[in-house]
Every structure is written in structure tokens, then in C-alpha cells.
Image (tube, rainbow, N blue to C red):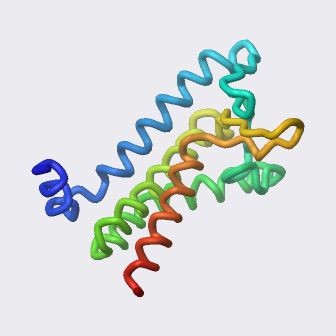
Amino acid sequence: MDFFFNLKNNFRLSIFYIPFCALVIDQISKYFIYTTLFLEFRVVKIFPVLNLVPVWNSGISFGMFDDSGDLGKIIFTTLGLTFGLIIPFYTVNWNFYERIGSGLISGGAFGNSFDRIIHGSVIDFIDFHWKQIHFPTFNFADTFISLGVAIIFFASFKKEN
């Protein structure tokens, strides 16, 4: 209990804890997936509705703008790094839950930007599907960004009530 109390009270001093943790989880997962699925193209079935599938994504979250070329890579990398750095400072006075959400968004932006710098594209690998209908393949950075947006949305909605 003291851990969460201290974390909550000292969170303003640690604006990069959540982004750093999200970045580390994202990059470790991508390294593992790259070394096990990408080097020898393999598909791993986890559950009937979940596969691990190697996909190179040159666009943004969930494959949007995948055909944007080199200019898109430069723009998306620059935006990801810029927002990844600015968001924690901009949101320092938000409430605890909003800062967690913004930290997840920041970490996800860093994770996908690092992929573009290292590999030229983003490593995606989580494939949810129902029979032959596949949701766009994604990664943990995309998940952190989406989860962060949802947390901020619900935290701000709760604040209004």
C-alpha cells in the first residue's frame, strides 16, 4: 500500500517512469518476436483467435498510412519522438490517472519511433482474428497508445461527473 501512495505522491518527479517502462516492454517484446518469427518467417498460433505473425509496418498504429514512403517514415518518426518527449512535460499537472495514460501514449510513441530508426519500419506481430476476418496486426506500443487514450478519456469523463 505504501508503494502506491509513494508512487502517486512522487509521480510529478517521475514523469518518464511510465514511458520508460512501456518502451522497455515494447522493445523487449519486439526483440523476442524479431529473433523468433522474423528471421525465419513463422506464424505461431496462441489461441484460436490469436496468432503471432511477423509484419513490417511502415505506417502508424494498426497499419494506417502504410504506403506513405520515406517521407512518411521521416514524418512519423519525428512526430513520435517529439510527442514522446513533450507529452510527459505537458501533462505534469494532470491528475494521476491522466498522467498514467499520457505516459503510456508517450512510451508507445517512443517504441514505434525507435523501430523506424533501427529497422526502417515498425515490427507488428499481434494478430487477432475471427475465422477469416483479421483485425490489423499491431504491437505493444500500439496497445499502450490505445490504452493510454482510453485511460485519459475515462479519467476526464469521471472528472466531469
Q: Nearer the viewer, residue 58 or 147?
A: 147
Q: Position of residue 18 (x, y in %)?
A: 34, 51
Give the residue drawn at x 33%, y 68%. 89
Examine the rendered structure and indicate whether residue 8 appears above or below residue 17. Answer: below
Q: Position of residue 130 (x, y in %)?
A: 81, 40
Residue 113 visible within the image: no
Q: Position of residue 144 (x, y in %)?
A: 51, 51
Horizontal side of 126 relative to 145 (left or right) equals right
Residue 154 visible within the image: yes
Horizontal side of 129 relative to 116 (left or right) equals right
Horizontal side of 28 relative to 73 (left or right) equals left
Q: Nearer the viewer, residue 140 or 56?
A: 140
Horizontal side of 45 relative to 154 (left or right) equals right
Examine the rendered structure and indicate whether residue 155 appears above or below residue 72. Answer: below
Q: Residue furthest top?
A: 40
Task: Please tell me in which quadrant of the rendered image residue 124 appears.
Answer: top right
Give the residue drawn at x 10%, y 50%. 2
Give the residue drawn at x 29%, y 67%. 96
Q: Position of residue 117 (x, y in %)?
A: 58, 41
Task: Please tell me in which quadrant of the rendered image residue 51 appears.
Answer: top right
The quadrant the C terminus occupies is: bottom left
Q: Nearer the viewer, residue 142 or 47?
A: 47
